[in-house]
Amino acid sequence: MKRRRDSWGLKRFAAVAILATIAALWTWTAPGDPGRWPARVDAGGVEASVEVHLLDNGFHTDLAVPRRALEARPGLLADAVRGLAPGGWVLIGWGDAKFYVDQRPMESRLADGLRAFFMPGNASVIMLDPVRNDPRTAYALESRRTVRLSAAGFDAMADHIEGSLALNGGKARLVVARPGDDARFFASHEHFWIGHLCNHWSAGVLNAAGLPVRPLRSVTSAEVMATIDRAELDTARSRD
């Protein structure tokens, strides 16, 4: 009888420990880097910064990045951007190599969506899509957030994106040039699945730029958008 009680007690302890671990991870915040974000005013009173926009289509997030800033730095990402069609901004996103590229109606590819979510080890791609319209006028405020990155923060963000690229002969490997638009999809060495979705990737990019994020909770696009809202609010409070 005592063995049964001890066994039951151990099971309860294990269950509580697992739940506590999940709760801790769910609320855990990966710290930001004040040396990268927010942008600071220099000795001459000038705020050296790069304006980047986070775009939310309701379930997926992309970044809108000034093309000139991307091309001004050396590296594989800049080389890939230079090969794009004209456009002053570049939309950057990440996702499953098949589901993310496919633009057919969602209801016709539900089975593929389940595969992308629940089968581990799915191939992934980084989208680089040049656009001519300024995101500040092309996207409504409710679907857009703006973040001003320091030079160091922008470089760290770009390095993080570049580090996700899978290379071929020392260059980014183009996988798909989607018909009908200018989006180009380059191979990524990361894997897409329920534990690492497009919004997790976007949160990682923001964290590299210096913003604090909640990695596990970044399943939804709304959480990634809230990352910028919280960071801006915390910064405003610290200045008061």
Image: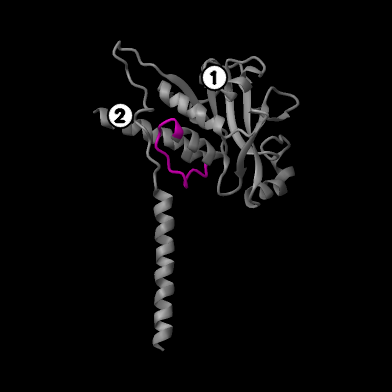
Q: Residue furthest left?
A: 240
Q: Position of residue 116 (x, y in %)?
A: 66, 47
> Magenta segment range?
208-220
Which is closer to the viewer, label 2 or label 1? 1
Residue type at mark 2: give it. Answer: Ala
212 vs 175, left or right, is left
Amino acid type shown at disc 1: Pro
How many labels, in total? 2
Residue placed at 47% from the left, 35% from the top?
A: 225
Q: Quadrant of the C terminus?
A: top left
Q: In this rendering, does residue 144 appear at all?
A: no
Label 2 close to label 1 by CB (< 8 Å): no
Q: Position of residue 203 (x, y in %)?
A: 48, 37
Residue 10 on the magenta span: no
Q: Nearer the viewer, residue 40 or 55?
A: 40
**Residue that badge 2 annotates:** 236
Residue sitting at the far top? 44
Q: Residue at x 39, y 37 (%)?
A: 212
- Image quarter of residue 45: top left
Q: Which residue is mark 1?
A: 74
In the drawing, what numbered circle is on residue 66?
none
Instruction: Say which residue appears at 26% left-offset and 27% top-offset.
Output: 239
